[in-house]
Image: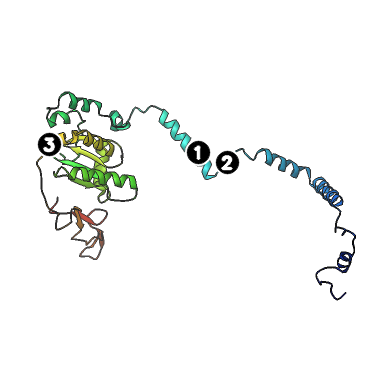
Amino acid sequence: MDDVSPLEPQWLSASSDLDEPVIPHFDPSLLACFERAVEDVSHSAQPASIRSKLESARFDEGKPKPLKEGSRSLSRMRSLRSRAAVDDIPDDNASQLRTFPFLHRKPSFSKVIALKNDHPNYSSQTYLDKFPKMCPPDCEGKVVLYFTSLRGVRKTFENCCMLRLILKGFQIHVDERDVWMHSKFRQELTEVMGAALSVPRLFILGRYIGGAEDVQLLHEEGILGKLLEDLPVECRQVCKICADVRFIPCTLCRGSCKIVTSLGISERCSECNENGLIMCPLCD
């Protein structure tokens, strides 16, 4: 008995010295009968309401759950449906934007490209006449580009950089109007186009040329160079005051948008914009 392991019972160690087989702890058939009996008892003990809920949950597992009243998903779905219903209703007081169908489709410019292939000796004014006449304020005789320097939307920022780089290669003066630095430029663009559109937007001599895809296509076809060939070449240096940003902090309020009167009352500065900036006097 001294050689018996403390982890094994004595009857198991004693039977190992004999030639008889070891009897298992539980009979497998008896254990299976016991498990079936426990399952039957537990199933019969459940109320009928619980069993019906479990069975219905099995069948409804792959079906979408109904939205609860007052939930955000339900309100979002209703707003989308209402917008779709409003879009189907014809509007007699449509904005000016709807009168220009080229703004609602991808740029093709088939007529302009055909004009280039048929009459390669046409002047730039002939090409400009094919584009709609839409002139922002102070755009006569200028190339105006509405863009944004805000990197909030990556695609929009990349398109603006691409157009600025394309126009810079022609070495002409471009009136760049940053809609993020000055909200007045955003209002100008909205009033001219008849709706709030994304940037960039290019205007040449009072004619609306298009957005990023439009200008890129015209540049690849060689038509953009035709539109700009009559403009004088300008080899200007970087502005020493604003570094070509075109804005500097307000000299009156120092960018705080507030001034204190002689009576000690704080008022809104009338010289700067909402960002406390004014136009550069050298670039303006």
Q: Which of the marked residues, 1 or 2, is nearer the chain's N terminus?
A: 2
Identify the secondary structure beneath mark 2: loop
Residue wearing tag 2: 67
Residue wearing tag 1: 77
Q: Nearer the viewer, mark 1 or mark 3?
A: 3
Q: Nearest the camera: 92 or 35?
A: 35
**Residue 38 at x, y percent in the picture:** 83, 50
Q: CA distance from mark 1 to mark 3?
A: 52 Å
Q: Are marks 1 and 2 in contact (CB under 8 Å)?
A: yes
Q: Is residue 271 visible from the viewing direction of this image?
A: no
**Residue 67 at x, y percent in the picture:** 57, 41
Residue at left 57%, top 42%? 69
Q: Nearer the viewer, mark 2 or mark 3?
A: 3
Tell me: 60 left or right of 251.
right
Under mark 2, the amino acid is Leu
Q: Nearest the camera: 19 or 168?
A: 19
Crowd tier of the residue under label 2, counting other residues whose Cα lies within 10 Å: few below 14, some 14–19, many 20 or above: few
Crowd tier of the residue under label 3, counting other residues whose Cα lies within 10 Å: few below 14, some 14–19, many 20 or above: some
**Residue 41 at x, y percent in the picture:** 83, 48
Classify residue 1 by image quadrant: bottom right
Under mark 1, the amino acid is Met
Residue at left 17%, top 37%? 204
Q: Nearest the camera: 123 or 268?
A: 123
Residue wearing tag 3: 229
Tell me: 106 left or right of 36.
left
Identify the secondary structure beneath mark 3: loop
Under mark 3, the amino acid is Glu
Classify residue 25 by image quadrant: bottom right
